[in-house]
Image (cartoon, helix red, strand yellow):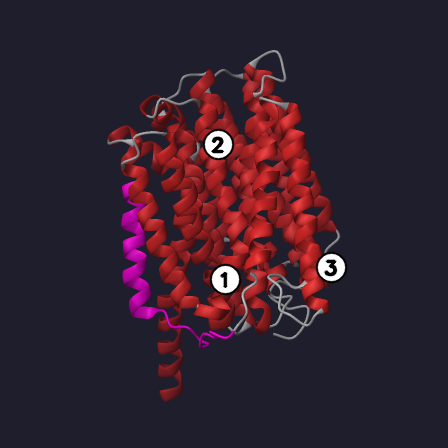
Amino acid sequence: MAEGAAKATSAAVARGVLLPLALAQFICSFAGSNMTVMINDMSRDLDTTVQGIQVAITIFLLVMAAFMIPGGKLTDRYGRKRCFNVGLVIYAIGALVSAVAPGLGVLIIGNSILEGIGTALLIPPVYILATMLFTEMTSRARAFGAINAAAGIGAATGPLIGGLITTAISWRAAFVFQALVIGLIVLLSRRSLEDPLPADPTRHFDVGGAILSAVGLILLVTGILAADNNLLLMLALMVAGALMLVWFFASVRAKERAGKEPLLSTQLFRNRTSNLGLVTQNAQWLVLMGVSFVVAAYLQVERGYNAIETGVIFTAATVGVLLSSLAAQRLAQRRAQRTLIVTGFVVTIVGIGLLIALVRVSPSAWALAPGLLVIGLGVGVMLTPSVNVVQSAFPEAQQGEISGLSRSVSNLGSSLGTAIAGTVLVAGLAATAGRNYALAMVVLAVVALVGLVAGAKLPANRPAGVPEQGL
């Protein structure tokens, strides 16, 4: 009886820990997608353009990606809970600054930079703590399932909730909503969240490596954003970004040979299964955020839909993510991770095909609903196994590094999705807006196909939740 009571207590504690972690992932994913339905309202209020809002969204996602690796590394030095709480505070400040922004510049400072840095500090601890606190493989798979379901739901409901708030009150209230959710997470984490390992203040932090990696990623994505204005500038920025990243990896190798601790160990890239999992993560978020931006911009700019009307259409994607996320645990117990990831990409490609085909058949915005539903189903099926493949491939000592790398790769996918698909949509590459829309969707389908190929190369005989090496 005592043993049963102890297990019940332990389960209750685990649920208490999981709630703030899942909420944190939800609000960060929500922030990445909710602005897509505010494009017209924000551009008018801030005296900017659709491209200006696209830049703000992309910079937010890019800052997350650029600082996620340093954020993961800082958890070893300062502790996971402390980094989590500091990230929450910076995020809340950024949300409030965004809410009162008089122009695009202040919005970029609040939303793109402060919220981006806050997210980069708080998200790696979410996955590190989940890995460390849920040591049994079934419970860990369940925890990852809940957190990744929260991520998918946040991204899928962002347009709907953002549209409701924007129409009922103002787009500024959507940022106040984010700050309120952050306040709730702070209260919940103070009561339930404890760091399983003490911080190690002696742990070295590679400042030079952090700067090189961040600048390289920023230049690379900025180059993509410049494609519709100046092709020469685009080429120069992308080459500069690539050179910075080469310099970063050369510095990592040099530090390892000298016996020093670099920002990112090259050992992380020697695991074939993890590498393939990272490719699938990048592709998933690139497609999800790319579709979200393209559909929202097309409906508002080309067809004149307001924020709430656009958000309601995205309910289809929300339902899809919810349904597949609810089934994720049962699917993980019955199917190999590779099967789930491959199936997810196949379903997502079908959904993109529906988005292209049905919009040509009917002028109604509801013609987009079947495609969004199918994409939601596909993404929801593969989010959890992709993360589990990567996180479970490394021991606890490397969880800080791999968590930062994993989240960086995912958020880089999000920023690339908005940058690439958005640039194709607004660049006028085709004769009409409808053809630009279709071209952007084709680009996203190609990315999904790359993810499918990577998923198909994963080991076939590993059930979900079973690590490649001891954890």
Q: Is label 1 in contact with label 2 (beta carbons under 8 Å)?
A: no
Q: Which residue is mark 2?
A: 55
Q: Nearer the viewer, residue 181 or 54?
A: 54
Residue 315 in the figure: left or right of residue 436: left
Q: Residue at x 61, y 66 (%)?
A: 392
**Residue 215 location (% of width, % of height):** 57, 46
> Can residue 378 be spotted in the picture?
no
Q: CA distance from mark 3 to mark 2?
A: 34 Å
Kind of residue indicated by mark 1: Tyr
Q: CA distance from mark 1 to mark 2?
A: 28 Å
Q: Is residue 269 above or below residue 29?
A: below
Per the image, label 2 sits on a secondary structure element best described as helix
Residue occupying the far top of the picture: 431
Kind of residue indicated by mark 2: Val
Q: Mark 3 against mark 2, which lies toward the viewer?
A: 2
Tell me the number on the disc at residue 383: none
Tell me the number on the disc at residue 127: 1
Kind of residue indicated by mark 3: Arg
**Residue 19 location (% of width, % of height):** 37, 61
Residue 280 in the figure: left or right of residue 404: right
- Looking at marks 1 and 3 on the same chain, the residue that comes earlier in the sequence is marked by 1
- Looking at marks 3 and 2 on the same chain, the residue that comes earlier in the sequence is marked by 2
- Looking at marks 1 and 2 on the same chain, the residue that comes earlier in the sequence is marked by 2
Tell me where residue 87 sits by quadrant: bottom left
Secondary structure mostly taken by the magenta-highlighted segment of the chain: helix
Q: Which residue is mark 3?
A: 272
Q: Residue at x 67, y 60 (%)?
A: 252
Region of the chain picked out in magenta, as a range = 175-202
Q: CA distance from mark 1 to mark 3?
A: 21 Å
Q: Mark 1 against mark 2, which lies toward the viewer?
A: 2
* Mark 1 burial class by Cα count in 10 Å: few <14, some 14-19, many 20+: many
**Residue 182 location (% of width, % of height):** 32, 53
